[in-house]
Amino acid sequence: MRRALVTLVVGEAYRRRFAAHAAPALRAYAKAHGLSLVVLDRLLDDSDIGRSRSPAWQKCLIFRHPKLRACGQVAWLDADILARPDAPSVFAGVAPEAFGAVDHFGSPTPEVFARARATIRDYQARHGITAADEATPRAFYGRYGYADGPDRVAQTGVLVLSPEAHGPLLEAAYREGRRPDGREMLFEMRPLSWHLLRGSPVHWLDPRFNTLWSTALFAHYPFLADPDFRAAWRERPDLFVDLKARCLAACHAGAHFLHFAGTAEDMAAFRPPTP
């Protein structure tokens, strides 16, 4: 079966970051598993709707690309993901009729995710940041306007898909517009997860295939986000960067794909392990 990895990089700043930090490992991972690598560098929908939304929505349109329509299965990876070249195949065990994804509320475990959420909410409260409470999948989908929904949430930064089974579901998600696009809505994630889980069987991937640095940060290294802690290193920013690099290395060592969703600036602090 022909398989491919696909990502999207639009805009010069994003292209430079992808080339510097993500591309080398992703190419090595693709080569290790005999996969094609397709890096889209322009919007698949260049209409007013496509340009008015985050490029993240374009993942819903990947099967408009002829090279990807010809594949039996495709793995979508957000461009802010560091793949480990020695990681196992993300396609392993995923039947073509099912889609593969990591359970958002259960990654890396429900307990660690909940601890990270609690720390984030405490941080927001201490800094006067108002945020909606989305402690359950029902609340997560309800915020987008769904009165009903699945009891789990697919984290859409990594998805294993097939054209025939999932192309129509992705297109249906793209047509959604119940809420304005924005970071607090997580762009396409709510409607895409909703349509995929309601319309397709799911193969839940090992959480290591979508290890969120933000979850690890607030669950294990919350001091890195503490302004008072950062201020203490003001005279030696190099030492603070070194500390963050060591925390990132520990997180990366336990991941297959390390995802910097919402924290892409931290990609620059990561130091690839020496072969």
Image (spheres, rainbow, N blue to C red):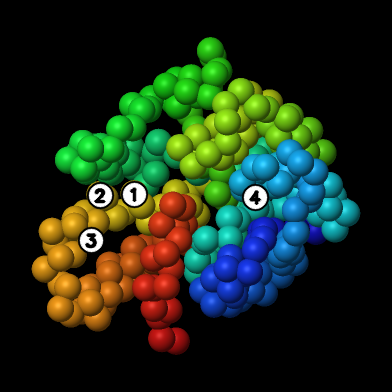
Q: Quadrant of the N terminus?
A: bottom right
Depicted 137 relative to depicted 113: above or below: above
Where residue 171 sits: x, y (%)? 76, 35
Residue in view at x 57 percent, y 26 percent:
179
Which secondary structure lies at badge 2? helix
Determine which of the numbered discs, if any, sits on residue 53 in the image: none
Q: What amino acid type is highlighted by mark number 3?
A: Leu
Determine which of the numbered discs, if any, sits on residue 224 in the image: 3
Residue in view at x 67 percent, y 42 percent:
52
Q: Which residue is mark 1?
A: 215
Q: What amino acid type is highlighted by mark number 4?
A: Pro
Tell me the CA gap for discs 1 and 3: 13 Å
Q: Which residue is mark 4?
A: 55
Residue in view at x 24 percent, y 81 percent:
238
Looking at the rendered image, the disc whose residue lies closer to the viewer, 1 or 3, is 3
Is residue 95 visible in the rendered image? The answer is no
Depicted 137 relative to depicted 51: above or below: above
Q: Which residue is mark 2?
A: 219
Tell me the CA gap for discs 3 and 2: 11 Å
Tag 2 and tag 1, C-beta contact below 8 Å: yes
Q: Give the left or right position of residue 164, taking residue 231 as reference.
A: right
Q: Dot 3, crowdedness within 10 Å: few (<14), some or many (≥20)?
A: some
Tell me the CA gap for discs 1 and 4: 23 Å
